Amino acid sequence: ASFAEALAHPDPLQRAGRVAAILAESGPDDLERLRGEIEAAPLLWGDLEYALFAGWWARFDPSAAISYCEDEVRTSHPRVIAEVLRMWGRTDPQAAIDSGWLVGRTLDAKGLNPDYLDPLVVGWFESRRPGLDEWIQTLDPASQ
């Protein structure tokens, strides 16, 4: 089945499985085609397939993936953005920290955005990369 057909499957479990299988076999060269097909998909805001797509994209360009998620209505769901940050934490947590994406995004937000911090920490922990404990100790509890 094509990506578009997988995205249109009526059963949520089968749809997610088919989408995941296609993404697992896809690479960065497939991004534009897959993005066009997911944008045309009959999905709702924050559906699991968006999180699968965004997490797949984050494996090779997390900064572009999170920017896209924040700019697109149907991918701006916390579940989708969390998947990008979790993957970023798995692959390059320091780049995620340095990117500025963890900082609060609203006028009244101060310090780090906990909705963004949690998935990054989980991804970093899952990666078993060193430095997580030391980084957490540097955080100012008053800024959260």
Image (spheres, rainbow, N blue to C red):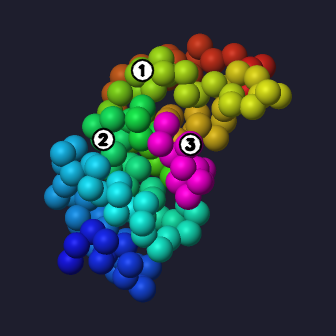
What residue is at 58 percent from the left and 28 percent from the top?
A: 102
Q: CA gap, disc 2 to disc 1?
A: 15 Å
Identify the magenta region: 67-78
**Which amino acid, by three-letter code, is at mark 1?**
Gln
- The residue pinned by badge 1 equals 94
Which one is closest to the eye, mark 2 or mark 1?
A: 2
- The residue pinned by badge 2 equals 59
In the rendered image, which quarter contains the N terminus?
bottom left
* Among the two numbered marks 3 and 2 on one chain, the one whose residue lies closer to the N terminus: 2
**Which amino acid, by three-letter code, is at mark 3?**
Glu
What residue is at 27 percent from the left and 49 percent from the top?
A: 31
The reply to whether the magenta stretch includes residue 23 is no
| Tag shown at residue 70 | 3
For the residue carrying disc 1, how many other residues have a C-alpha within 10 Å: few (<14), some (14-19), or many (20+)? some
Left or right of 47 in this view: 140: right
Q: Is residue 62 above or below residue 27?
A: above
Q: Quadrant of residue 103?
A: top right
**Which amino acid, by three-letter code, is at mark 2?**
Arg
| Tag shown at residue 8 | none
> Tag 3's secondary structure?
helix
Which one is closest to the eye, mark 3 or mark 2?
A: 3
User: Residue 108 in the image: x percent, y percent?
Assistant: 82, 28
